[in-house]
Image (cartoon, rainbow, N blue to C red):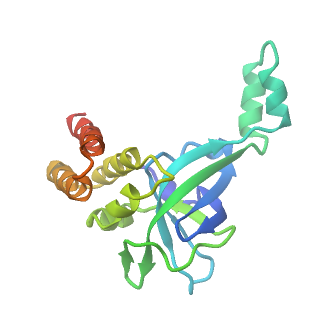
Amino acid sequence: MTDNWKSPIGHVLRASTAGFSAGTRVSHIQAPQFGMIVRAQPSIDERDVVYGLLYDIHIDDDPLVRQLVLADAVSEETIHDQRHHRMVPLEMSVLAIGYRQGDWIRQALPPRPPLSLDPVYLCTPDEIREIASRFDFFKLVLGASQVPSEQLLAASLLIAVGHLPEEEQYDYLVAAGREAARLISSDLGRLDYLLRLISSYMIG
């Protein structure tokens, strides 16, 4: 387990109660990953810590990139310089699934969004286990039209189960599958797709 959660992976660009976007440099792309559980940490203690699932990573271009892609050949040195020395922007989109209320994380939309430039962190193992201990956030994910909800939920479960003891992992995913079935039993095609994603993780 790396300690990527100790340093910010980006800072909030824009936000609403439904989620937020964060930006960083493209050279920092090693830390964020689709499905990861992250938090926007307020710089003022009176505001809420907002938790969410990372569902999109977008890399913008700039005038130099546009010129380089039209070149007949681009050297490895030029590519390395572009990725590691220049301020190439990377944007991450996050679906809100909860917020900290006192000593516990409530799995519901936050009462207010984070503010611009609030740092965004990967959640700690303890936070991930706390969020994974309940399935209340499933409804928020499966009801979100702006995200690939089945893939996002399955990916987040894979990340969460990796922080549980090995002997608990299978039972956890079975219980998660049952909760998902309860929520979307009326859409058998969607349910089948989600359960296949979860079962592929269990087999793998």
Image coordinates for residue 5, horizontal then vertical, percent: 49, 58
Residue situated furthest top in the rendering: 72
Residue situated furthest front in the rendering: 186
Q: Quadrant of residue 180?
A: bottom left
Q: Residue at x 29, y 44 (%)?
A: 194
**Which residue is more in the foreground, 96 or 168?**
96
Q: Residue at x 58, y 45 (%)?
A: 57
43 horizontally vs 173: left or right: right
Q: Residue at x 59, y 55 (%)?
A: 9
What is the tally of numbered marks visible in this picture? 0
**Which residue is more in the foreground, 108 or 121?**
108
Q: Is residue 131 above or below residue 103?
A: above
35 horizontally vs 180: left or right: right
Image coordinates for residue 96, horizontal then vertical, percent: 48, 65
81 horizontally vs 156: left or right: right
The image quadrant where one finds the C terminus is top left
Image coordinates for residue 170, horizontal then vertical, percent: 16, 48
Image coordinates for residue 192, horizontal then vertical, percent: 24, 40
Q: Residue at x 26, y 67 (%)?
A: 134
Q: Is residue 193 above or below residue 183?
A: above
